[in-house]
Structures are given as structure tokens and as C-alpha cells.
Image (spheres, grey):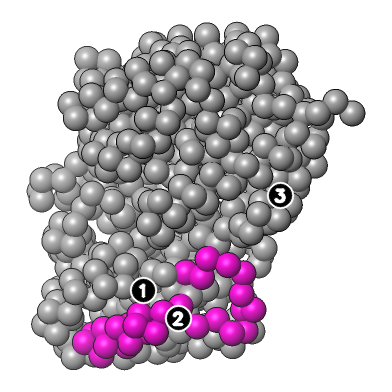
Amino acid sequence: MSTVSAFLVTGSPLPLLRPDNPPWAVLADGFKAASAALVASRPDVLLVYSTQWIAVLDELWQVRPHSVGVHVDENWYEFGDLKFDIESDVALAEACVAGCATIGMSAKPVDYEDFPIDTGTIVADALLNPGRVPLVIAANNVYHDFAKTEALAAMAGETAAAQGKRVAVVAVGGLSGAYFDHRIDIATDHVRHEADDTANKAFLDALQQGSEASRAAVGDYAGKTKADFGMKHLAWVLGATGGFSGAIVHGYSATYGAGAAVVEFKL
Amino acid sequence: MAEGKIVAGFIAPHPPHLVYAENPPQNEPRSQGGWEQLRWAYERARKSLDALKPDVLLVHSPHWQTLVGHHFLGVEKLSGKSVDPIFPNLFRYNFDLKVDVAMAEACCAEARAMGLEAQMMRNPGFRVDYGTITTLHMIRPQWDIPVVGISANNSPYYLTLDEGVDEMVKLGEATRRAIEASGKRAVLLCSNTFSHWHFHEEPALPEDMTKEHPQSYVGYKWDMRIIELLRRGEVDEVMRLFPQWVEEAFAEVKSGAFPWMLSAMGFPRVPAELHGYGTVIGTGNAVMEWNLEGAGA
């Protein structure tokens, strides 16, 4: 494996758009620490999987060399716009498209002007990647389960290794999934359900104990907390890294009631 | 001012394949056609809509998903290119639409008055979702009637289905009150597919109709059962079956547009007209109309 660093981060735009708000500042600060670690690992490419880029037919891979624009989030538009300027590692992305066939998965490249890069990818790139290292972005096919997502990530990691590239693995998604269903004073934002808060913290503890403990915990945790897409973004980390020995939680908080964290994995 | 009224409601599904197949100038990709039965169904619906001469079209789309309450487009002019993140090869549509902001604000205010969480979307850079655009294009490609765009609050997914439906029934009542107070003639658009079981791989040529058929026989049977009930005006039976329909057909109506529209129309016990039915990547799609004015409802 050529993986030099790995992260699991929230895809909510709130820490990016309003880092001054105390509950979201915790996450914004966590991103700063994670970003420093990512930069220090000197990756050639960021291997990104965001739960917010949904696919239903085939596995989609972004192969447009340069994506630039302004994105307005469909939920949090009142807090501001999201500018993005993203470079892709086209050679690796195209190799991943081809590599999907080797794991029995149908895949397609995506190369369209004005394609709506998802909020999670934009947030991760903005807060983790000051050096504008190229990205390879894979979609979240909603019909791929945890195991299939892990196989997908493993293929991507092996493909990057075959190209001799140093890889930072970036999994973008949330923790517990219960948002507040009414307007709140954002300064008071917190995980909506106490039980979810407890479960989130226990799950983060499991991540810190390494792959084995994480695997043992994830199914029950995801079921109890309606976690973001069953924590398939953790499958991305597990598959692409081949496993981790522990983790550092750089930040844990809420994004309008849902659980969110910034985690760096020890490889 | 004369009292406003809902003159009709349409089930107007939004597979972007239909726009792609039609090759309108606004859409970049070119096709060789396909999905003709559904496009002919929309041709019939377009004629009917034209005769109704509505002042405003209200559309509820499952592809503008909001976490906190029901949102309404609140910018008078919205334009840009909508690229479908799921089917970017088929749908890259340059849209330019006019919003009836006053009507949207009235709907939002009535929703709040009924205790629902609701808010106006005021960001002029907002990219309108492909569900809203596809439904509006297919029903009125001239884009000459102002619209009200309504988001799909995720409540039917986070709450129990009954609680989610209850929310949408209230939103429908709020919509009706706002329309009645407006003095306008309104048409409602339920942007929903019925059976939502679909294929997981796309044919090399998307419009190759030899590959198109219902993905699920169970889903197909549900489609026919519901269409037949609606054609007989048996909306009470449809709503009784709603939870089972959603569960067994994986029906997209779970997202709320269907109970919203029926509620706004007062759950009309008049026969709906089927303009046509067809599948798109295996999903079941019906274009149906309740002409309330014609029925004297």
C-alpha cells in the first residue's frame, strides 16, 4: 500500500461557512489539525469518497481535469456559497474506472462542465487540502453495501500503488443522522439525542483502538444511530488503507443535531 | 378579488431520460428518442394544461431534499445549468424560470401558521434540482407560467411514515389556503415515480428500448393496482394502502408529493385521467390528471 495518511471527516458545510460558531468551531479547528497532518504526509493524490455524491446506476468517478465554480448547498444556502477549484488526477481516476471491471463492478467516468461537485467533497478539499493536491473522487452508489464499498476502495488503493503514488485517503461523511427538525439557535447546537451522543463517543473510541474494534462496532452503531449511509465512508478507509492501528479524534461536535467528527487514522 | 382555486393536479414524474429523449434546445446531450409512450402521455397532459390556463404551477420535488422543514423557492428569477449528478450523461439543462414569489411566500406563511417548519430560499445562486426542472419542462416546455418550487422535507424518512404523511397533509391544506386567498388559478404537480425498483447498470445506449421493462413484477402490479384505483376515484382506498404500497413497491411517493397534492385537492373522489404509463430504467411512471374544474369539484 502507498497510503501515507487517512482521514474521516464531516461533509457538512457548516464548519466551513460559519467557523465562528462555537459548536462548529470545534470541527473547523479539527480540520486545521487534520490538514496539517495531511500536508505533512506529502501525498500525490487524495482518494476521496463522499456520502453526498449519490449514484444509483454504475460506479461514477470524476475525471474532469479541473472543476471550478460556486456551489449553493440545498439545505444551508442561507450561510453562504461554496467556491471550489479542484484538480483531478485523471490518470488514476481513469485507471480506477477500468479497475472496477476487475472487481465485477460497472463504472463510468464523469467529465462534464458545471457538474455539481457535492458539498462534502468541496468542504473536505477546502479545509484539508491547502496545497491543491489533485483528487480522485468516487461516488457513493447507494446500492453498494459496506463490503462492496471496501472492495471498491481496496481496488482504488491498489491502483494508486501500481502508479507509484503516495495516497491520502479521505472519507467524507457524518456520524449519527438525526438532525433537528426545527430551527435552532446555532450557538446551542448539540447532538440531538443523548443516546446518539453516547454512541458516537463510543464509536470514536473504537476507531482509536484500530480496525478490528472499529469493524466490531460499526454495524450495531450504524443501526442504532441511523448513521450516515451506514458508515460506508469507514469502509472506504478500511479498504483503501488495508487497516489502521488507531486514530486521533481532532474534533467531535454536532452539525444541526447530527454527529460530526474530524478523525485522523494511524497507519 | 375572485377566490383562487386549484383547477387541476397532475402526477408528473421526473425521469431526466424524458427530457433527454425529446432533445429540447435547453438540454446539451442529444438522443435518438426513446420512452415515447411516456412522452406522448406528457403531450396529452400539455394540451390539457394549456386548456386550463393556470396562473401558477406548484411543484413538489423529491430531489430538493431539505433536512429542516419545508423550503420554497423565493427568488423571482432563477437561471443556470442544472447537471444531474446521477445522470450527467443525459441531463445538462439550461434553465430559466420565473418564480411566483408572492404565492410561495403565502404557502410558506400558511404552513407556518399550521405549525409546520417552513422557510423561503432567497439565495439567487441556487441551482434548481433536476426533478423540479424535468417535471416543469415535460408539462410546460414554454416556461411561460410562473412556478412555486417546494422541497421534500425528509420527515417521511426520519419520522414514522404516518407522521410524515400527516406533515404532508398539513402542507397540502396550507397550500390550498394560500391558493384560495391568492385569487389565482393553480395547477399542482406531484413530481413522483410510482414503483421505484430500478436497474443498477445503464445500457450502452440509454435509449435502447429493447432494454426497457419493469424491473420488478411486484412493483408493476402495484402500479397497475394504484392506477386502476385512481381511475375509479378511489383515493380513500389508495391512502389506506399507502404504507403497503410504499413498502412493497419502494414507491417514490414516500417523499411526500402525492399526499401533499391529494390533500391540497381535498382528496377528490373523482376519477383521475391516465394520460399514459411507461417504465424508465425499470421504474413505473404514470402521467395522471385530476381536472377539478372539469369535474365540478
Question: Which residue bears the numbered disc 2?
Answer: A191
User: At numbered mark 3, what does the secondary structure look like: helix, strand or loop?
Assistant: helix
Contact? badges 2 and 1 (CB < 8 Å): yes
Q: Quadrant of the N terminus of chain A?
A: bottom left
Q: Chain of mark 1?
A: A
Range drawn in magenta: A179-207
Circle 2: residue type:
Val
Circle 3: residue type:
Glu
A206 inside magenta stretch = yes
Q: Position of residue B126 (x, y in %)?
A: 64, 49
Contact? badges 3 and 2 (CB < 8 Å): no
User: At numbered mark 2, what does the secondary structure look like: helix, strand or loop?
Assistant: loop
User: At numbered mark 1, what does the secondary structure look like: helix, strand or loop?
Assistant: loop
Whether marks 3 and 2 lie on the same chain: no
Question: Which residue bears the numbered disc 3?
Answer: B110
Q: Chain of mark 3?
A: B
Circle 1: residue type:
Ser
Q: Position of residue A33 (x, y in %)?
A: 44, 89
Question: Which residue bears the numbered disc 1?
Answer: A176
- Which residue: 41% across, 23% down? B234
- Which residue: 63% across, 19% down? B297
Q: Earlier in the sequence, mark 2 or mark 1?
A: 1
